[in-house]
Image: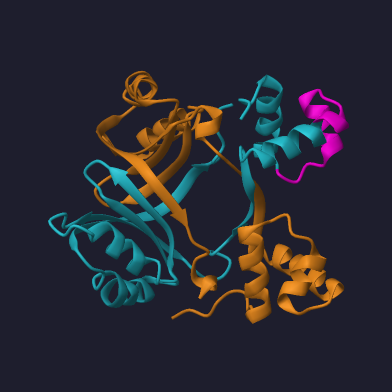
Chain colours: A cyan, B orange
Amino acid sequence: MQAPDDADRRLLRHLQASCDLSIPDLAEKAGLTPATVARRLSKLERSGVIQGYEARIDYHVLGYEVEVSLRVTLDKTQTNAFDMFIAAARKIPEVDEIQTFLGRVDVRLNVLARDMAHYQQIYRTRILTLPHISDIEALMLLSTVKNSEGLPL
Amino acid sequence: MSEPSAELDDKDRQILRELWRDARQTAQKLGEICGLSQPATWRRIKRLETLGVLGARRVRLDNEALGFGVTVFLGVKLATKGQVSLDDFERAVTAIPEVQLVQLVLGLYDYRLRVVARDLPDFERVLRRRIMTLPGVGNVEANVLLSEERRPGPIGA
């Protein structure tokens, strides 16, 4: 695979900022011709540099007021603790992110709930029953100050 | 339990799930998947956008192919607190290009940050020169991201 060059990076920078730009708009911003933009985009998609396009779902609008980041330490004396924990966590619909880490935290789950009563119910009946947990810490989201998800290209 | 602010039916949820997975699908293709006509699908998409449930689309990139091999989550505790220090910290931290996400949280830390870097030495540079020098910063915990899986969330059920 050919590494993305400067023009690719410029293109991706604008695409990151707004996914809804048309090819002529992108071309103008990146200083390329529309034909070049179309060709480069399809190449970046084929090579997997662009993995896809996704729509955000705003759960706040759907009445989910509570978002908690659960930082889980697993009992690693169990050989397949990670696999079993993650497989079980996938079955909880209110979990929208599962991340694994190298550090003091093993796994992080992002949990969405309608309100504190709902959160408590999920926590007691779904989270605490997950296998091989040795410790859990919760960070409750107060506000998102920045969410760019963009790379500094 | 509070009532949901926007009532969605199964077809709405299916459309949301599909667009969450691949935002480039046309109303016609979505209609075929959901068993709706193209105009009916289009009207539902517009309604979901108007309600604000269907948010902005974004491109998903292969960080590693673009030279960003390392993602680290930081838990940051401020040494001093007060409205001024929160504002100062937030203003300075959001200006760092490598910082993708800044969340004010309640718990063991005050802020959660998502930071991208080229590699571990590059991350160390960002940590030492940009993060540790932020106004009011106290204790910092770093966890290196190994894998990440996003799920559609409650509408996926």
Q: Which residues are magenta?
A: A19-36
Measuring from the top left, give residue A137's x and y in whole percent.
24, 56
Residue at (23% x, 60% y) in the render: A81
How many numbered circles are shown? 0
Residue at (71% x, 44% y) in the render: A19
Residue at the farthest front position: A1
Front-lying residue, A111 or A81 = A81
Image-based side of B6 in relation to A145, left or right: right
- Assign the N terminus of chain B to one quadrant of the image: bottom left
Q: Residue B82 sits in which quadrant?
A: top left
Front-lying residue, B51 or A15 = A15
Q: Is residue A67 magenta?
A: no
Task: Judge whether residue A82 can be spotted in this image.
Answer: yes
Measuring from the top left, give residue A75's x and y in whole percent.
16, 58
Residue at (27% x, 57% y) in the render: A82
Measuring from the top left, give residue A95's x and y in whole percent.
41, 65
Seen in the picture, residue A56 relative to B13 is either above or below; the reply is: above
Q: Residue B118 sits in which quadrant?
A: top left
| Secondary structure that dominates the magenta span | helix
Q: Residue B45 sits in which quadrant?
A: bottom right
Seen in the picture, residue A128 relative to A44 is either above or below; the reply is: below
Task: Judge whether residue B9 can be spotted in this image.
Answer: no
Measuring from the top left, give residue B5's x and y in whole percent.
59, 74
Seen in the picture, residue B98 relative to A6 is either above or below; the reply is: below
Front-lying residue, A66 or B16 = B16
